[in-house]
Amino acid sequence: MRERQAQEAERRFGEAVRRAAAEGAEVADRHGEEVAAVMGIAGCRRPGGDLPDFREFLLSAPGWDDGVEFPRDRDLPRGIDFR
């Protein structure tokens, strides 16, 4: 990721846009603190790259075929007095 000062990025915005589309994101900093980024549209549309969606992620989880049991407490909950 390329970095430059915010003031320079303002003067050369067109160049920053071209480079971001061709080479990847560019970060602008002000007084040493990152304040903005210019990135190509492909990075905006799918920031995670080729990650599966959440549903696919959950469905791809391994099964519990290792004999692990999750015991449940069968006691009734404690009584509550609503007076």
Image (cartoon, helix red, strand yellow):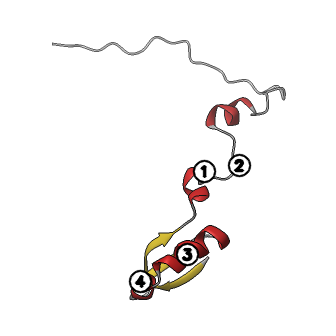
Of the image marks 4 and 1, the number of the one nearer the N terminus:
4
Is 49 located above or below residue 73 in the figure? below
Q: CA distance from mark 4 to mark 2?
A: 31 Å
Of the image marks 4 and 2, the number of the one nearer the N terminus:
4
Q: CA distance from mark 3 to mark 2?
A: 21 Å
Label 1 environment density (alpha carbons within 10 Å; few <14, some 14–19, many ≥20): few
Q: Which residue is mark 4?
A: 6
Residue 31 at x, y percent in the picture: 38, 88
- Please give the label number shown on residue 25: none
Relative side of 12 to 83, left or right: right
Amino acid residing under circle 1: Arg
Residue contact at pointers 3 and 2, CB within 8 angstroms: no
Relative side of 30 to 4, left or right: left
- Count every numbered label the image shows and give the total: 4
Q: CA distance from mark 3 to mark 4?
A: 11 Å
Q: Which residue is mark 1?
A: 46
Residue contact at pointers 3 and 4, CB within 8 angstroms: no
Q: Secondary structure at mark 3?
A: strand
Residue 22 at x, y percent in the picture: 66, 70
